Image (cartoon, rainbow, N blue to C red):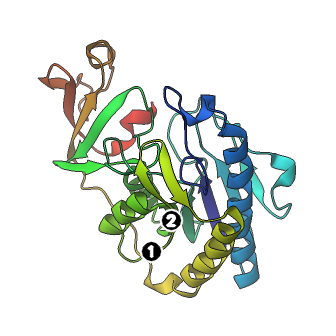
Amino acid sequence: MKFMIAVDLEGVACAVSTVGDTLSTSPNYAFACKQAVREANAAARALFDAGADQVVIWDNHGEGVNLDYDAIDERCDIALGVCVAGRWPMLDESYDGVLLVGYHAMDSTPAAAIAHTYASTLYQAVTIDGRLVGEMQIDAMLAGQVGVPVIFVSSDEAGVRQAEEWMPWIESVATKKAMAFHRAVSLHPKRACEAIYKGVQRAYARLAEMKTLTCPSPCRMEVRFKTLEEAQRANFRDMNGQPFGFADAYTRTGTVRAPDILFF
């Protein structure tokens, strides 16, 4: 059995940013990286203990070079870095499932820690056929394109709720409850890892019940930007190779076959 663990940072236990900073520029970044390794290792250990043959840990926050790779369970392979078209690194139908660890709620979510959608200073909102989506939903749809289900999610409480709205079959762990963008009450880091281990074992035991999340193809996609400049500069192309139109001054829209235009 073969799995990929996608590891972000904002949703790990005790990770918050400071006012005026992203997590990557805040004093909490170094701790978040360490905790992300701990939580990824807990997930990987649960998979191996349950019978997995291969686990790939994907460092996918920002530029994809955040984790202490020496500290990752040595049984795992590691995907890292950016600047290749597409989203999931070498994901194909040979995988039995993917896990989203340390993920976060979509931009503009009230009472969610460091909520954003891919680029915290760029996108205000993304919709597919009129329905708001964030990183968890889009990443799950792209995995679903190759027939691979999301089986487990860890995030703050708001992120877990959003994931379960789209994927009610998953197992999940809420690592913290946010009161505001920069404030949360978190599980102790060690208890979060214990909860993730148990949650992943539950997911493995229910593999036969897991489903893929698929995106209608074609679909209507709207991307609302945070600045006029970025909306005007966007070079998104629709399924016919034409530039996205303007729904309003801040929002570009077009019909696409898949929501992967954000990664080209």
Task: Name the image quarter holding the C terminus.
Answer: top left
| Element assignment for label 1 | loop
Report which quarter residue 162 is drawn in.
bottom left
**Seen from this angle, which residue lies furthest left?**
247
- The label shown at residue 153 is 2
Please state if 30 lies on the left or on the right of 160 as rendered.
Answer: right
For residue 143, above or below residue 45:
above
Q: Are marks 1 and 2 in contact (CB under 8 Å)?
A: yes
Q: Residues within 10 Å of mark 2 (few under 14, many from 20)?
A: many
Horizontal arrangement in the rendering, residue 237 relative to residue 60 (left or right)? left
Please give the residue where the numbered disc 1 appears in the rendered image.
Answer: 170
Q: Is residue 232 visible?
A: yes
Q: Dot 1, crowdedness within 10 Å: few (<14), some or many (≥20)?
A: many
Q: Give the mark, 1 or 2, whose residue is nearer the N terminus.
A: 2
The quarter in which the N terminus is drawn is: bottom right
In the rendered image, is residue 213 in sight?
A: no
44 or 261: nearer the viewer = 44
- Residue 209: name its quadrant: bottom left
Marks 1 and 2, how far apart in space? 7 Å
Q: Amino acid at mark 2?
A: Val
Residue at 55% across / 80% down in the picture?
A: 203
Q: Residue at x 40, y 74 (%)?
A: 211
Q: Position of residue 111 (x, y in %)?
A: 36, 51
Q: Nearer the viewer, residue 21 or 130?
A: 21
Element type where label 2 sits in the image: strand
Residue 112 appears at what percent x and percent y?
40, 50
Q: Residue at the location (72% across, 40% down)?
A: 30
User: Tag 1: residue type?
Assistant: Ile
Q: Nearer the viewer, residue 117 or 155?
A: 155
Q: Is residue 154 above or below residue 209?
A: above
Q: Is residue 86 above or below residue 38?
A: above
